[in-house]
Image (cartoon, helix red, strand yellow):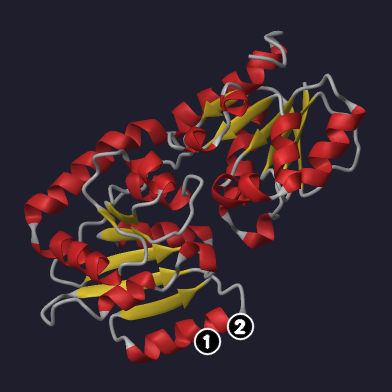
Amino acid sequence: MRIVLITPYGAEQRGGNWHTAARWTAFLRDAGYEVEVSTEWNGAPADLMIALHARRSFKSILAFAELYPSRPLIVVLTGTDLYRDIHTDADAQTSLGLAHRLVVLQGRGVDELKPEHAAKTRVIYQSAPEIPHQQLFGGPFRVLVVGHLREEKDPFRAALASAYLPEHSRTQVMHLGRALSEEMAQTARLAESRLPRYHWLGEQAHDAVMEQFARADLLVVSSVMEGGANVICEALAAGVPVIASAVPGNIGMLGDDYPGYYPLEDERRLAQLISKAEHDPEFYAELVRQCRNRRALMTPQREASSVRQLVGEFEMGVGKTV
């Protein structure tokens, strides 16, 4: 079977969509499928299309559906799809109707879909391989923020929270990610100059990010919207607990009863949770325990099996409808 996989961002962007595309391509090639990855479909013959992002990949989705209306079309919904575009954008809405299967990347994603779309949806959690953790003693309490600087990520909430930490805190916030505008870069530099606990390290190679996870004590995910954050998978793979904004995409990853949520855009509450994680061993151990339990959903073996099963439904003649 020849599969074309469309991702709106190429490898040079180093974003979550690209990492998802790269993993899925490897899983499917290992299973014997022929997979071509592209940012836009060139019309080459294909038996099945997988498209990441309902709005940004719409041109390819529409072209494939028009040329091959009976061939399987799978659309993977991102955070901006689920929590913005499918409610307001005509292209994204059309993509939902054209898809024979929809995929969401965390358990709460289905809640955003109409019943006729939810019925053809699969949940596939993303994954990361194990990251050996280096236990460090006597140094700073290392808090990571990982993600490009853009509005959807509420990127400076951890920086703002650092101003409300107690004076005796050993917390240092390390922010890894490229500024997607000069305004964001200026804000990051200003925050670094005014907030001594905050350090913007800029864009880093993936191996360097993994090295940071290996030495981290905590990850903060402050996003306004998330489809299913890759960085949560990576934190759990390293045994690093998470403090996250209480938005559906994060709750769908970490579970309804997870104690590490703070109200969106509330830096004072975020500071309280960071401080509690640093100074309350029982609270920290509970975060670690629950993250370890959720890790079972996000292993490469489970993701690979889910992706191959998704394609296998059509290969084995299950067909386009549920």
Residue holding disc 2: 182
Q: Is residue 65 left or right of residue 245?
A: right
Q: Amino acid at mark 2?
A: Glu
Work out whether 18 lies above or below 269: above
Q: Return the mark for residue 186.
A: 1
Q: Residue at x 51, y 31 (%)?
A: 124
- The amino acid type found where label 1 is placed reads Gln
Q: Where is residue 296 shown, x and y percent of the image?
A: 34, 31
At label 1, counting other C-alpha atoms closer than 10 Å, the crowd grade (few under 14, some 14-19, many 20 or more) is: few
Q: In which quadrant will I find the C terminus?
A: top right
Q: Position of residue 270 (x, y in %)?
A: 26, 65
Quadrant containing the N terminus in the rendered view: top right
Q: Is residue 58 left or right of residue 304?
A: right
Badges 1 and 2: C-beta atoms under 8 Å apart?
yes
Q: Residue furthest top?
A: 317
For the residue pair 85 and 176, the one nearer the viewer reads as 85
Q: Position of residue 20 (x, y in %)?
A: 58, 43
When asked about the image quadrant of residue 96, the answer is: top right
Residue 1 is marked as none
Viewer-proximal residue among 120 and 74: 120
Element type where label 1 sits in the image: helix
Is residue 204 visible in this depiction of the protein? Answer: no
Instruction: Indicate the secondary structure of the residue bearing disc 2.
Output: helix
Residue at 68 percent across and 15 percent down: it is 321
Q: Alpha carbon of mark 1 to alpha carbon of mark 2: how far?
A: 6 Å
